[in-house]
Amino acid sequence: MCTIVPEVVEELKKFRFAKNNESSALILKVDREKQEIVIDELLENVTVEELQESLPSHQPRFIVYAYKMIHQDRISYPLCFIFYTPRDSQMELQMLYARSKLPLQKQADLTRSYEIREIEDFTEEWLISKLSKP
């Protein structure tokens, strides 16, 4: 399991309690040499498609996403934890991420957790279908 650096812990807290008017994402990655989970990128006002484009095609990532969801009479910003692990990424890297997933999810205090293996599967329709389930 990789160490969650203090900057990530702090950024997760800020991200959870931020007041956003649009969707935003905190992308985290594993620093293989240091065996640490670090911040890769913070994206504000980002669509699912833009988020998809910002992800590397062959390297896993952890994504904390606040999605602007429009209901019939209101707007909500559900938070979710997405574990993106491409099938063709290196096995060693996949294992590092897999071992760190649950501790990071607990640290982020997120109950909505999803996994994506193919970047093309990460669409707005997919996300809405996941978030709409009770």
Image (cartoon, grey):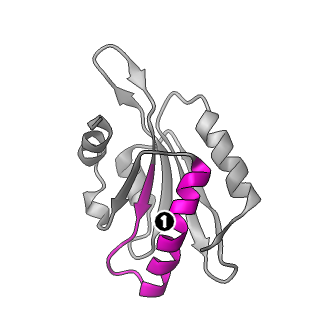
- Residue 103: say if magenta: yes
In the rendered view, would you say 22 is above or below 130? above
Instruction: Determine whether 79 is above or below 107 in the image.
Output: above
In front of the other: 119 or 83: 83
**Snapshot quadrant of residue 125:** top left
Q: Position of residue 120 (x, y in %)?
A: 26, 61
Q: Is residue 113 left or right of residue 18?
A: left
Measuring 28% from the left and 35% from the top, which residue is drawn there?
132
Q: Where is 58 relative to 127, above or below?
A: below
Query: Would residue 27 be visible to someone looking at this image?
Result: no
Q: Residue at x 66, y 83 (%)?
A: 33
Can residue 76 be found in the magenta stretch? no
Q: What's the residue type where badge 1 is placed?
A: Arg
Front residue of this view, candidates 103 and 58: 103
Label 1 element class: strand
Q: Quadrant of the N terminus?
A: bottom right
Q: Which residues are magenta?
A: 81-108
10 relative to 73 in the view: left or right: right
Q: Is residue 46 left or right of residue 117?
A: right
Q: Which residue is mark 1?
A: 61
On the image, the x and y values in percent for residue 100 come to 55, 68
In which quadrant is the C terminus drawn? top left
* Lateral position of residue 86 relative to residue 129, left or right: right
In percent of width and height, residue 39 lies at 63, 60
